[in-house]
Amino acid sequence: MNSNEIDIHKELKKYFGFNHFKGLQEKVIKSILAKENTFVIMPTGGGKSLCYQLPSLVQEGTAIVVSPLIALMKNQVDAIRSVSTNDGIAHVLNSSLTKTEINQVKKDITSGITKLLYVAPESLTKEEYVEFLQSVPISFVAIDEAHCISEWGHDFRPEYRNLRTIIKQLGNVPVIGLTATATPKVQEDILKNLDMSDATTYKASFNRPNLFYEVRTKTKNIEADIIRFIKQNKGKSGIIYCLSRKKVEAIAEVLQVNGISAVPYHAGLDAKTRAKHQDMFLMEDVEVVVATIAFGMGIDKPDVRFVIHHDIPKSLESYYQETGRAGRDGGEGHCLAYYSYKDVEKLEKFMSGKPVAEQEIGYALLQEVVAYAETSMSRRKFLLHYFGEEFDSETGEGADMDDNVRNPKAKVEAKDNVKKLLEVVRDTKY
Ligand code: ADP
Ligand code: MG
């Protein structure tokens, strides 16, 4: 079928039940159907999956989707199967399959039933699979979470570095890279490592106009300050992120003692407790979850009203992701970070045991967080600039939604003090 003849709106309704495309989806899908290399940058929740799922369903051949998370792949396969009459329409190829299952997958692909084949990057390096895939028609290769290819991303996966070599062995197939990481450095890395500098890039805005950004200097009264904040926001749901499990436990306890319904969440708790605490938060049996960054991936609570960072995050990328869990419904979302230079030193010490290259990247990312915490300019402008996006801090959407813009004076004084301290520390460090 000629790509111009496909009524993609009709297909959208038929397979996904939606009446409209979201954001840049339609453009991206047209680009993929035109067999172009395509690079998609959209925030989490932007609807990236549909960008490759829909074109795979309406084209000849099988689309290969590379994704780092097996659970995620399974979800997507189940979702696609639920709207089809044939379970063979989507498959996962991974190391857990039996010989019989692998043969069924191969049979479905060969007979042209399978439109989507999800693979983990390490499975794709298996010679046996590559040989097989060379012998069948491939519509395109989509690389989800493409930032995994970059050491500057938050989730570097060395296996992603082999992808280009393998894709080349599949012949001349279009490549689609997708990510929610918007920093120019990571984007550059993706295009370079996938050898797709010719790709057409589709980048959605990362501005979240309903989020209010605030940084407070961290003092020894931080606990009282947090309690006051939560009491002022009574009845609202919020997340408090802490760096360590120990701190998570301590803060959760302090909140409970002060009459705030809060539960801890970190990877040191057993799976049952974690699931219980997460459900309590989702069902609004508790107002606050105090957590390490282990909490949040894939959690979709639309009315989280505040995200507090008790300790600074390790990068602005993480900060954006973590604060992004507030105000998903478009309503109010207060993002409050506590900052002290001591925490920066703590994080640096943390990193000092790591390989040199990793350390350097870690320090550089951290310096951006420091700069964000200390800036007196519009925080939204600062964040969006970090993501390579121009923001007009006078007329842009959400322009007055941060402490610096609302209250310019008080900040400057605090900032100068910290800056002096910083210079001393930096000079001794480098
Ligand atoms: P991403 O991978 O960009 O984080 P997903 O692909 O997981 O986002 O999609 C996020 C949500 O948006 C899903 O629940 C999906 O069903 C929904 N979605 C995607 N496209 C549309 C659309 N055109 N209309 C309505 N909802 C959509
Ligand atoms: Mg996704």
Image (cartoon, grey):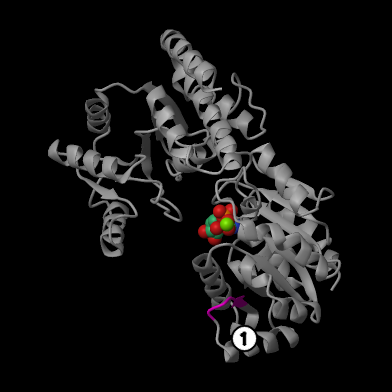
Residue 62 in sight? yes
Give the amino acid at mark 1: Ile
Q: Which residue is mark 1?
A: 102
State the SS at label 1: helix
Q: Toward the viewer: 348 or 89?
A: 348
Lateral position of residue 154 relative to residue 257, left or right: right
Q: Is residue 274 above or below residue 293?
A: below
Q: Residues within 10 Å of mark 1 (few under 14, many from 20)?
A: some
Lateral position of residue 248 relative to residue 352, left or right: left
Q: How many marks?
A: 1
The reply to whether the magenta stretch includes residue 86 is no
| Span colored in magenta | 91-96
Q: Position of residue 283 (x, y in %)?
A: 28, 55
Lateral position of residue 46 relative to residue 249, left or right: right
Q: Quadrant of ligand 2?
A: bottom right
Q: Quadrant of the C terminus?
A: top right
Residue 340 in sight? no
Q: Position of residue 329 (x, y in %)?
A: 45, 45
Residue occupying the point 52% across, 65% down: 72
Residue occupying the point 58% across, 25% down: 381
Q: Toward the viewer: 153 or 44?
A: 153
Q: Is residue 78 above or below residue 320?
A: below
Q: Quadrant of the N terminus?
A: bottom right
Q: Quadrant of residue 47?
A: bottom right
Please identify the residue farthest to the bottom as the structure is shown: 100
